[in-house]
Image: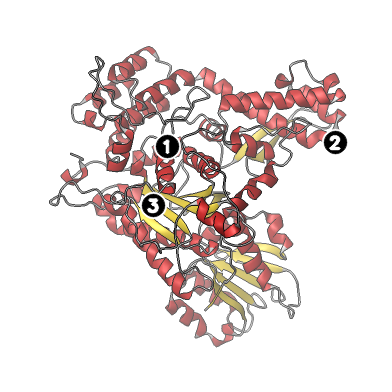
Amino acid sequence: MSMSDSDTSSQGSEYKNFRQITRDRLLNEMLRSTKTGDSKSSWKVLIMDKATLKIISNACKMSDITDEGVSLVEDIYKRRQPLPTMDAVYFIQPTKENVVMFLSDMTGKSPLYRKAFVFFSSPVARELVNHIKRDRGVMSRIGALREMNLEYFPIDNQGFITDNEKALEELFGEEESSRKGDVCLNLMATRIATVFASLREFPLVRYRAAKSLDPTTMTTFRDLIPTKIAAGVWNCLMKYKANLPNFPQSETCELLILDRSIDQIAPIIHEWTYDAMCHDLLNLEGNKYVHEVPNRTGGLPEKKEVLLEDHDPIWLELRHAHIADASERLHEKMTNFVSKNKAAQIHGSRDAGNLSTRELQMMVQALPQYSEQIEKLSLHVDIAGKINKIIREMGLKELGQMEQDLVFGDAGTKDLINFLRTKEDVTRENKLRLLMIYAAVHPEKFEDGKIAKLMELARLPQEDTNAVYNMRLLEVSSEAKKSSIIPFSLKFDVQKKKHAARKDRPGEEVTWQLSRFYPIIEELVEKLSKAELSKDDYPCMNDPSPTFHGTSQSASVRTGQIPPPHSMRSRRPATWARPRNSDDGYSSDSILRHASSDFKQMGQRIFVFIVGGATRSELRVCHKLTTKLKREIVLGSSSLDDPSHFITKMKLLNANELSLDDIQI
């Protein structure tokens, strides 16, 4: 079995971000490697299954694939036209069904393709390889048979998912689902491990330990989820270490494996940054947004689908900014553009931030050389305008304040009752989110019937009450409770000690209203980076080698760079919060260029994997901490969930019967 052997470790001379490395492997190691001198045609067919199609779609553009000589992309399970003069590249999962389909294509006197180059997305079983080798006729038509070890789905320059959408349901539901759960965990572990095969990184593997109340308490399947994932990843890494060329023999990075119980609030609470608000409030289909654009011929506006992604420099600059900050900066950009272009002044109104569609259309016609800039700006002005309108109409500022007051212990049961009684126009979903937050902060209220009474007051239907009760299945881990609840004070305060799920972070200045909340992983990653994470709560699968330090300084020694002194407690503005305006007010002069160049001076990577779904707030925190800690933080998860997706999953969990072992004493 031939294996890919490119060295793409972060220790290489050119530091590429996570998504770039993924894209380069697919284009260079797979597609480019199939260019052979004896090929009669330079064009190839690319054949994939459902999973590998999604992998390549997340990492590459169609133009990237066609540039490598692919003229046709096919589904392995659909009937295909014979193309006997062309070569075929198979990028498939190593399943028996896929191997049978491949052999069917290439066997007999009239194979579908001239030659086949086969790339498996993850390690292939020996019996499947032997099954292929037994067909002598097919073997003579195989140009390559390799394990790519690339079976994850990049969703961001610093994020990936394993695409286990049902992980929450299969792993956190009833105990009887443990067999299905083990299958889910094994697939997840294999896919996580292929990330490290791609990057040629060997991690120090840490995981949230199973809680043990006392020696007589039985550990549940849910308690062991991070432990089982860590063991599965470790087994794969040991095979890579033994068999994969250029795979490191000592630790080059850190991996922390968590599950959704570490932070029940992050998937539900309103996150007030531009990216999160787009996905929470605008019902986007993935990253697709339907936008009205001026008709160049002067007719009615046209509907256009646009993707909110990294190729758009305005999106890249504003996606992690607070919605109020993003709105201000968009207004400034439009004002700058109008003030610096006389033709724009003629066709634009005095308030450049409130240009009508007609005025934008006239501006595009008058300034064709700036049409792309104007369209991009008008797109984001339109989006921000819609979000701000929804915030006003739904009273989200008051709702958001109540959410954060509950989380930080500044509001209690009486405040919530008063809110529900006086704010009758709050939507059903927002009432549900409030009660799920309350259940996460006050799990003890299930026992005294308070939560049941609150749900009656909110007039929630049965399926919504299920979601609230199912919050008990996501118990907060002991470490999160210890680190987040306000410590006991010796002062004799008149006021009662507040019950909180978060405490304000020292040195973190809140610039914008409702940006006080932070996900728990922010604390955990900072502690991990400073080697302050509890070894009891987060043990290691492997003892680090003596040379491993896990700090940016250690990597800096390799590159000859000396990092400036930096206090973890001081607040520095992150790069995403710093406007970089060019003269035309359109975008930063080099946002896209800087996005990857900043990584060259970084220390060793930190990977965080969350079983049960990650959130956009957690992805934002990874970008923020990358700047702050001078280490690239990569977030992985079984899925990336917006609040509506997470709530739907919580409704599907079955919490009919909880054993005593499931109740935290």
Instruction: Write the residue at 61% across / 63% down.
Output: 25
Q: Which mark is residue 369?
A: 2
Tell me where residue 380 appears, x and y as whole percent. Answer: 66, 31
| Nearest to viewer (mark 2 / mark 1) | 1
Instruction: Write the residue at 85% across / 34% down.
Output: 368
Q: Please, which residue is most extreme toward the top here?
A: 422
Please state which of residues 57 and 72 is positioned toward the viewer in this rendering. 57
Pointer 3: residues within 10 angstroms few (<14), some, or many (20+)?
many
Judging from the image, what secondary structure is the residue with disc 2 in? helix
Please state which of residues 641 and 79 is positioned toward the viewer in this rendering. 641
Q: Earlier in the sequence, mark 3 or mark 2?
A: 3
Residue 311 seen in this snapshot: no
The residue identified by callout 3 is: 257
Residue 289 seen in this snapshot: yes
Q: Point out the image quarter for the C terminus.
A: top left
Tell me where residue 589 appears, x and y as whole percent. Answer: 74, 39
Whole-number angstrom distance, CA of label 3 to CA of label 1: 15 Å
The residue identified by callout 1 is: 519
On the image, which quarter does residue 23 sit in? bottom right
Tell me where residue 618 appears, x and y as whole percent. Answer: 47, 40
Please state which of residues 591 and 299 is positioned toward the viewer in this rendering. 591
Whole-number angstrom distance, CA of label 2 to CA of label 1: 43 Å
Pointer 2: residues within 10 angstroms few (<14), some, or many (20+)?
few
Total label count? 3
Image vertical order of residue 411 relative to residue 308, above or below = above
Judging from the image, what secondary structure is the residue with disc 3 in? strand
Name the kind of residue labelled 3 in the image.
Ile
Q: Earlier in the sequence, mark 2 or mark 1?
A: 2
Whole-number angstrom distance, CA of label 3 to CA of label 2: 49 Å
Q: Which mark is residue 485?
A: none
